[in-house]
Amino acid sequence: MTLASKITIVRVAMIPVYMILMLMGQQFAAFAVFVLASITDFVDGYIARKYNQVSDFGKFMDPLADKLLVISCMAIFCEWGRFPSWALMLVLTREFSVTGLRLVAVESGRVIAAGWSGKIKTVSTMVALCVMMVFSVEILDFIAIAVIVLTTVVSGVEYFVKNWDVFGFSVKGNS
């Protein structure tokens, strides 16, 4: 197993630690775990590319770890009444939809790599959730949620617009 994959596994193991700390009211400790887990997302990707450690396991587990970390945080905030359930549902819908799009693309031998908007969405979401963990201020929650919703929608639309032909449809409407 590569170093990059080991780092990804550590990130997955941090998720229940993060959740337990949050639910025990240890928000600053949870914040530290969340930040560390978020940083490992960039570290494992850098190591995988730089040292040619890209693997099928990493391609599967790295995005899954990101989604689990972010959604666990959103679910806790949703339970606490600080994150609206419709916004959580929007994020989940985007994630399932893009995953489904990638699965359909794979069937035709095509790989849909993460685009810049998806990377911006990931970073923006992680930063916004960090703001919510550190500050419990209604206007900051509103701004953080707006950033998450906006980047989620924009990146989701971009994936589908750029790859609509995967479904056998022409973007121009000729098919």
Image (cartoon, grey):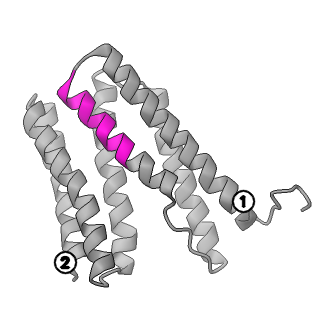
- Magenta run includes residue 142: no
- Residue lying at the far right in this picture: please name it: 174
Q: Is residue 156 shown left or right of residue 37?
A: right
Residue 7 at x, y percent in the picture? 19, 68
Judge by depth and name the residue closer to the eye, 157 or 72: 157
**At numbered mark 2, what does the secondary structure look like: helix, strand or loop?**
helix
Residue at the (61%, 61%) spot, across then down = 101
Quarter assignment of residue 42 = bottom left
Instruction: Tell whether position 132 is magenta.
Output: yes
Above or below — where is 135 with respect to 15? above
- The answer to whether residue 164 is seen in the rendering is yes
Is the residue 19 above or below the residue 14 in the image? above
For the record, the magenta segment spans 123-135
Dominant SS of magenta comes to helix
Extreme residue toward the top, this view:
138
**Which comes sooner in the sequence, label 1 or label 2?**
2
Q: Residue at x 50, y 42 (%)?
A: 152
Q: Pointer 1: what residue?
A: 164
Q: Is residue 139 left or right of residue 102?
A: left
CA distance separating discs 1 and 2: 35 Å
Residue 173 image point, x, y percent: 88, 55
The disc at residue 6 is none
Residue assigned mark 2: 3
Question: Looking at the image, is 166 positioned above or below residue 80?
Answer: below
